[in-house]
Amino acid sequence: MKTVWVHRDIAAPAEKVWELLTDVDCWPDWGPTVRRAELDGDSFEVGANGTVTTSIGVTLPFEITECDPGTRWTWTVAGIPATDHAVVALGSDRSRAGFGVPWLAAPYLGVCAVALRKLESMAVGNGLD
């Protein structure tokens, strides 16, 4: 299925952005639709499972379906392909983060753009916007 993307250049190292993208405790801080997330176990890798509670209070299972450490990960939520997460280094102190969604969910890219702004604020140390 075709994926459509939104990206944002961030004045922070890719490693810092990756850390925020994979730390489930941080997801509610940058993810507008996430109230809470828990990972079963300690490893963020292909096959890892957990739960995510949406902003409206619905708790759903998730599974990490692809993971290229430091670069990209994808997941399914309740068995449905969901957001693709990526980060690329643009030097030692800059990166480009992006979220991809199945083209049928293209309107969700607006939410992803908000998430990228929050992610940037956290990565550069300005707090949340």
Image: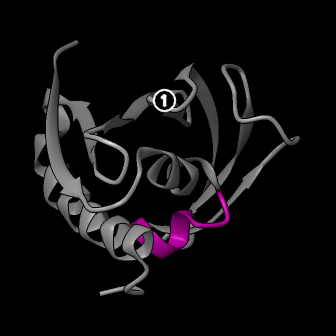
Where is the C terminus found, in terms of image quarters?
bottom left
Q: Is residue 94 above or below residue 116?
A: above
Q: Position of residue 97 (x, y in %)?
A: 29, 46
Q: Is residue 126 above or below residue 4?
A: below
Q: Residues within 10 Å of mark 1 (few under 14, many from 20)?
A: many
In this view of the protein, which residue sits in the foreground, 58 or 74?
74
In this view of the protein, which residue sits in the foreground, 68 or 113?
68
In this view of the protein, which residue sits in the foreground, 58 or 89?
89
Q: Is residue 66 above or below residue 128?
A: above
Q: Which residue is mark 1?
A: 73
Q: Position of residue 22 (x, y in %)?
A: 59, 47
Please give the name of the residue rendered at 69% of the width and 26% of the height, measured from the top-left corner: 45
Q: Residue furthest right?
A: 41
Q: Is residue 53 magenta?
A: no
Question: Is disc 1 placed on a helix, strand or loop?
Answer: strand
Visible in this render: residue 118? Answer: yes
Q: Is residue 92 left or right of residue 9?
A: right
Please give the name of the residue rendered at 50% of the width and 50% of the height, measured from the top-left corner: 21
Which segment is the magenta one? 24-33
Q: Is residue 13 above or below residue 72?
A: below
Q: Position of residue 93 (x, y in %)?
A: 35, 54
